[in-house]
């Protein structure tokens, strides 16, 4: 083999290795031949590697086979992206995505959040049940509760029912400190409970954090998406897949990949 051909073959092999492509002699010879014919440098024709799916880059996905990610550019943002992911045969694939809205106060670390700040808590959380003023979308498998005139979410720090759905409002839960769910027919047409501060509620940390339908603007601390996307998410979620939602930012201490 002539020296010029050897040098060209070596360059082709190096470029293939750098791109993560197979570096077999056959592949290298093919690349050399195509370069000679087209005159286009090999490096400019090697496809870029696809981005690694977000769940693979996370510290924890909850251990199940379904994950919703809600990511904002930074803690001061009120908009971002929600995506939902399915794992089959050990491989994560995105099942859908939608533009998202966050709290008017931005995002903050969930473990130190303070109630009344209109911030969306970052972290990894379960999704215990859905609810809404409208019927559950066809195919919904997660438990779903219909909102009635006496359906409330107790946010009274002095109540034993703090951060719980109640129907009717118990005597120890003040109405002025709680949310009557029927008062928000647009946002709560359909929703999923985000289990922030839910299993063992810490009074004063916050209550009533949901994934729900968009309203007019930023939320009071929830995550919201367009109505069609919310319906698709509810029909997609399967309790047997142990679904979770991860909320975070693109980088920094509250980066979604840290949860």
Image: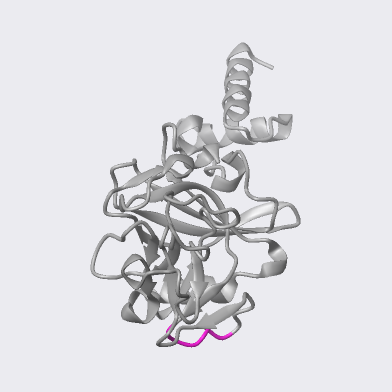
Furthest-left residue in this view? 216
From the viewer's side, name the closer residue of 33 and 13: 13
Compared to 235, does 163 lie above or below?
A: above
Q: Main secondary structure of the magenta part?
A: loop
Residue 146 rendering spot, x and y as whole percentages: 50, 85
In what quadrant of the picture does the C terminus appear?
top right
Query: Is 136 included in the stretch rendered in magenta?
Result: yes
Q: Left of 190 or right of it: where is 104?
A: left
Is residue 217 in view?
yes
Compared to 123, does 198 lie above or below?
A: below
Write the residue at 40% across / 55% down: 81
Query: Is 117 included in the stretch rendered in magenta?
Result: no
Compared to 258, does 82 lie above or below?
A: below
Residue 109 rendering spot, x and y as whole percentages: 43, 41
Q: Left of 212 or right of it: where is 217?
A: left
Write the residue at 48% across / 62% down: 162
Residues rendered magenta in the picture: 133-138
Residue 203 rendering spot, x and y as whole percentages: 47, 52
Is residue 47 in view?
no
Furthest-right residue in this view? 89
């Amino acid at each position: 083999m002539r020296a010029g051909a050897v040098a060209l073959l070596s360059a082709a092999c190096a470029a293939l290795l750098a791109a993560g492509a197979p570096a077999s002699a056959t592949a290298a010879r093919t690349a050399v031949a195509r370069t000679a014919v087209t005159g286009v440098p090999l490096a400019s024709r090697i496809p870029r590697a696809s981005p690694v799916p977000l769940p693979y880059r996370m510290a924890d996905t909850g251990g199940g086979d379904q994950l919703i990610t809600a990511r904002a550019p930074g803690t001061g943002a009120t908009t971002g992206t929600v995506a939902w992911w399915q794992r089959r045969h050990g491989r994560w694939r995105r099942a859908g995505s939608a533009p998202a809205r966050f709290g008017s106060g931005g995002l903050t670390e969930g473990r130190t959040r303070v109630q009344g700040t209109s911030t969306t808590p970052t972290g990894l959380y379960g999704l215990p049940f859905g609810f809404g003023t409208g019927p559950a979308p066809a195919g919904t498998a997660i438990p779903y509760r219909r909102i009635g005139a006496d359906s409330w979410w107790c946010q009274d720090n002095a109540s034993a029912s703090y951060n719980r759905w109640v129907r009717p409002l118990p005597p120890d839960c003040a109405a002025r400190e709680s949310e009557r769910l029927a008062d928000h027919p647009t946002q709560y047409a359909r929703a999923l409970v985000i289990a922030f501060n839910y299993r063992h509620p810490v009074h004063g940390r916050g209550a009533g954090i949901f994934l729900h339908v968009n309203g007019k603007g930023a939320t009071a601390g929830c995550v919201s998406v367009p109505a069609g996307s919310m319906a698709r998410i509810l029909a997609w979620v399967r309790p047997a897949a142990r679904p979770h939602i991860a909320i975070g930012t693109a980088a920094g201490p509250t980066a979604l990949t840290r949860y």
